[in-house]
Image: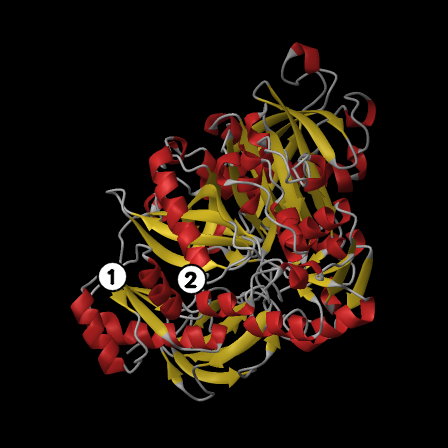
Amino acid sequence: MNEREIEIHQFDSILIANRGEIACRVIRTAQRLGYRAIAVYSEPDADSAHVRLADDAYALKGSSSSESYLDIAQIVAACHATGAGAVHPGYGFLSENTAFASACESAGVVFIGPPADAIELMGSKRLSKVAMLEAGVPCIPGYEDAAQDTDTLKAAADRIGYPLMIKASAGGGGRGMRLVEKAADFEAQLKTARSEALNAFGSDEVILEKAVIEPRHIEIQVMADRYGNTIHLGERDCSIQRRHQKVVEEAPSPVVSEALRQKMGEAAVRAARSCGYYGAGTVEFLLDRSGDFYFLEMNTRLQVEHPVTEMVTGLDLVAMQIEVAAGRKLELQQSDIVLRGHAIEVRVYAEDPARDFLPQTGHIALWQHHGQNVDELGLLTDFSASPTPLAARSGGLRVDDGFLSGQTISPYYDPMLAKVIGFGPDRETARRHLIKGLENMTLFGLTSNLSFLGAILGNSEFIAGRTTTAFLQQQSQTLNIAKDDAGLALALAALVIYFKSDPRATGLSATGALAVPVAANIILQAEGGETPPQTIRLRRRAAGVSMGHQHQAHPSFDISTDEGTHELVVLATEADALLVLIDRCRLRVPFILKGPEASRTVWLKVRSAGTIAHHAFVDVTRQRKSSAASVGDGRIYASMDGLVIAAHASEGDIVKQGDLLFTLEAMKIEHPLRANASGRLSAVHVNAGTQVKGRQLLAEIEIQSDE
């Protein structure tokens, strides 16, 4: 492409073909650069944060991803209808879709991303690995040929040796990926990997690779213009992963030396140049214990974790993408890129760590944080001068979020809510800023992984920088968030309900009508119904019996739970918080009480022994004892809102406890639903393709005792 052809690609408006936090993040930079930012939105996202933030918005038909954000024709139509001159795809959805990049070009709309042929090449794990071998980029020994019959793959696996990885050639994110420990398991794991790959990516092609045990996952950010200038922006350590999905990322890596950074950076630049790449891209490597590294894949888009690179380089990567797409030369040289300071990012998900990280849906009652957004950070968008890394300053907190209080998290999309980035002149300062930022966050309305993230950041192995891809598995016991004080949370939840509902509890004076002990029994159940209800007994002490002479003017309580008795003094009540004294510690307890009186839910945030936890309890005091089924009663319920993608048994079948009955897909994850008892399947209420709600009855088993 000559300079004249490049120069004509100018535009003054950008359509963001995405949603959530990444759409908000791109919109902010586009507006900062003077572009008109245009949002697209599905029916469930009509009142979303990215729609409110954009200058204009276009309504897509449909609710699910396939009906809306993945519909290329609709996105192109949105460009024409709004006059958008360019499209930024964010990440996920159509960001690495060759057909979409080509469709934009055919429609005369600039695609803010790499050329379509580079996307196609790097979108295939098999073809990209062949290209990397030819370019001299270190690769893991394996099989990447075109023959895909089972016998050929089995023979190749036996040659490679075990353990090995089966990987979907066309995808990522852990789908279509299986670790095979021994030869006897190969064919079963191959079948599962192929099925997942076909459902997720439309192709069941796979590659095989020797398993690199407990490596570090290191990726190099590259940036290239249309004139062949290519540089790298250093590395990110993304070793902490769950189900091959990254959870914590940081830059720079605690174990990468300057010499290793140079070697990996040069390999990444070779990888980008080998496919005529331009724009932002990420070359991912596995780093083994000996210091050798191997090409894993290249992501031809902006990464979720790009903010940590921005903080240690001072560069706005979205602005750089837009500059390259507009045909401008990359002015920065490799020598201009110096990593200073440190940044750590965690991903906040709507999921329940205590229930195997089950994705959550629901209404966001309250979302509060004290972080800065990308507009407030001063990232460099003028690339004619050397950048000043933000993390080298005193430090702080960045939050990239994409939702607001009052909005609903639907089952149609990925459960990631926000990215939280702590930064500072060194790793420990960045870590402390991040921990404090998470502790100061309040998220009421659905369960999240906030406490789990805090546990990771406080883990001694993480603090020492000794994390590998096996970290979460190895540290699962120390990261168990169920160890927080549930008894204290129950006591405080009961106190909230008492003050909000008992007419005798109005006011805080210890004299007058409240001068005599007041007792109450409140029955609470943890939201989700996984544990039995518990009766909490409150007894208000008589005046003058409160703890500590200086607090005798405040009402005090003995509150008993199954875990023990707590003595509390209530110092003040607010509309959404209680100020209490517990064991000489003053605690402010934010809360929200919502729902009908017969089944109110109280959300509260509790600090105990230096940890912060969000809790939710349902007040079932006024409910009659329910005859609703418990585990083992033969009634099979949907674990959450989702789509039944497979029914594995039919009405009349004899099933055993533990048999797989349904596969439910929600938030891009498959959830198996199994028989909780043995017997005859007396009723099946759904079929494959049925959209269901959480706790919807799917099937009933006529229980038969084992003979």
Q: Which residue type does callout 1 highlight? A: Pro
Mark 2, residue position: 174
Q: Residues within 10 Å of mark 2 (few under 14, many from 20)?
A: some
Looking at the rendered image, the disc whose residue lies closer to the viewer, 1 or 2, is 1
Residue 204, by quadrant, is bottom left
Can the viewer see residue 615 in this picture?
A: yes
* Residue 544 on image: x %, y %: 70, 15
Q: How many marks?
A: 2
Which residue is depicted at the point 77% across and 42% down? 501
* Residue 295 on image: x %, y %: 35, 55
Q: Which residue type does callout 2 highlight? A: Gly
- In the displayed structure, 511 sits above or below 461; it is above
* Residue 244 on image: x %, y %: 41, 56
Identity of the residue furthest to the bottom in this view = 652
Image quadrant holding the C terminus, namely bottom left
* Residue 436 on image: x %, y %: 58, 30
Image quadrant holding the N terminus, namely bottom right
Tell me the tag on residue 141: 1
Q: Nearer the viewer, residue 197 or 394?
A: 394
Q: Nearer the viewer, residue 605 or 472?
A: 472
- In the displayed structure, 460 sits above or below 109; it is above
The residue tagged with tag 2: helix, strand or loop?
loop
The residue tagged with tag 1: helix, strand or loop?
loop
**Image-based side of 237 in relation to 208, left or right:** right
Which residue is depicted at the point 72% across and 62% down? 8
**Image-based side of 271 in relation to 140, left or right:** right
Which residue is depicted at the point 78% across and 72% down? 80
Contact, CB < 8 Å: mark 1 with mark 2?
no
Which residue is depicted at the point 48% across and 80% down? 646
- In the displayed structure, 485 sits above or below 167; it is above
Tell me the tag on residue 131: none
